[in-house]
Amino acid sequence: LVGRRNDVGVLLRGHGGVQISHNLLSGNKVAGVMVHPGGGGHSQITRNLIGPLADGAAHGNGMAPLAGEMGAGVVIEASSDQLPVEGVTIGNPDNQQGGGNLILDNYGPGVLLSGNVRNVVIVGNSIGSSVLNRGNEGPGIRIEGKPATQVSPQGFQVQANHIVSNLGAGIVVDGAQD
């Protein structure tokens, strides 16, 4: 039997201080985790399988994104006219063994930061897998601007991640306006 797919595995909107951990987030139409305006402050996304099934089989997130959106493993986005999304940690800031996320097999970037997003830390994750020789269908991490928004790499920390086997670059920072 095939069940209906969720649009998003976890949607964080309007709340902060949330810990999303030890979840299997796979096969969602848009994203495994999505953080929208007003959400995220002091939240942590850690120790999740974002994309693969528990047995390691490829299944991915983002195979049917909504119009105007890009599918990905983790999406954090806000347009310039919305409240910012800020203060989210993706991974393991304490560098504990196995504390990050495994993010692969997604139909877009492993992690997408877009628009009015600030003070995001991406640390200690495996984004793609050299052992499985699989990655994401986009860059490992994409930080981008959109028309009428400004994104600045200032306030972002991307460190101690294992980023391999993704389509395109490991990390893309694109502030270009369309």
Image (tube, rainbow, N blue to C red):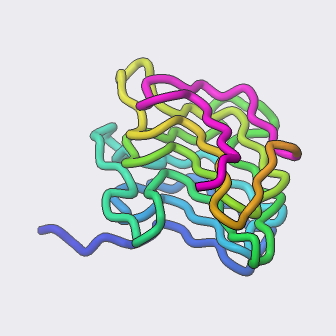
Kindly report the secondary structure that dominates the magenta region of the rendered protein.
Answer: loop
Residue at x 51% of width, y 56% of height: 23
Count of number-bearing discs: 0
In which image quadrant can residue 12 be found? bottom right
Q: In this view, does 36 lie to the left or right of 42?
A: left
Q: Nearer the viewer, residue 13 or 99?
A: 13
Seen as rendered, the residue at the extreme left is 1
Residue 37: x %, y % from top left: 72, 74
Q: Is residue 83 above or below residue 164?
A: below
Measured from the top left, where is residue 36 in percent x and y? 66, 71
Find the residue positioned furthest to the right: 155
Question: Which residue is more in the foreground, 132 or 115?
Answer: 115
As drawn, 80 above or below 151: below
The residue that appears at 64% across and 38% down in the rendered structure is: 100
Quadrant including the N terminus: bottom left
Q: Give the range drawn in magenta.
A: 155-178
Residue visible at 37% across and 41% down? 105
Instruction: Specify whether 26 is left or right of 36.
Output: left
Taking the view exactly as shown, the residue that stands out farthest to the top is: 131
Q: In which quarter of the image is residue 39?
A: bottom right
Q: Where is residue 74 in the image (x, y as percent from the top left)?
A: 56, 54
- Residue 135 in magenta stretch: no
Quadrant, the C terminus = bottom right
User: Is residue 158 part of the magenta span, yes or no?
Assistant: yes
Against 3, residue 45 (above or below) is above
Q: Is residue 64 left or right of residue 72?
A: left
- Single out the residue that lies furthest toward the front: 178
